[in-house]
Image (cartoon, helix red, strand yellow):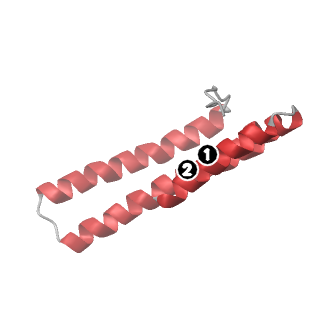
Amino acid sequence: MKHMEQKTHRCESDKQDLNKRLKKIEGQVRGLQKMIEDDRYCIDVLVQISAVTAGLKRVGFQLMESHTQHCVADAIKSGDGEDSIEELMRVIKQFSKS
């Protein structure tokens, strides 16, 4: 099975939304670094880590949904659906481990 290295043509609003979410996560990670530097209470740091993890999962699910609705659907229509579905299932299994 080949690895499907393809570029996706995301619409500008999707890119902006994803980047907005990732910038928020980036800020949260910087906040975590400051919390560690400031010797903040462990539970507070752990709660913030949980928020960052949840944010990354939301970004991942948004990408998976878009990929399924567009890339996988297009591959099925063009007769190349089996490879695309196998690839998606591998990623879902990997994603659900985290």
Q: In which quarter of the image is the C terminus?
A: bottom left
What residue is disc 1 on? Answer: 63
Can you see residue 29?
A: yes
Residue 31: x, y in percent? Answer: 26, 54
The amino acid type of the residue labelled 2 equals Gly
| Residue at the outermost bottom position | 43
Q: In which quarter of the image is residue 51?
A: bottom left
Residue 47: x, y in percent? Answer: 33, 69
Q: Which residue is drawn at 45% across and 44% down?
A: 22
Residue sitting nearer the eye, 82 or 98: 82
In this figure, what is the number of numbered marks? 2
What residue is disc 2 on? Answer: 60
Q: Distance between the residues labelled 2 and 1?
A: 5 Å
**Badge 2: how crowded within 10 Å, few (<14), some, or many (20+)?**
some
Query: Is the C-beta separation of discs 2 and 1 under 8 Å?
Result: yes
Residue sitting nearer the eye, 22 or 7: 7
Q: Quadrant of the N terminus?
A: top right
Residue 68: x, y in percent? Answer: 73, 46
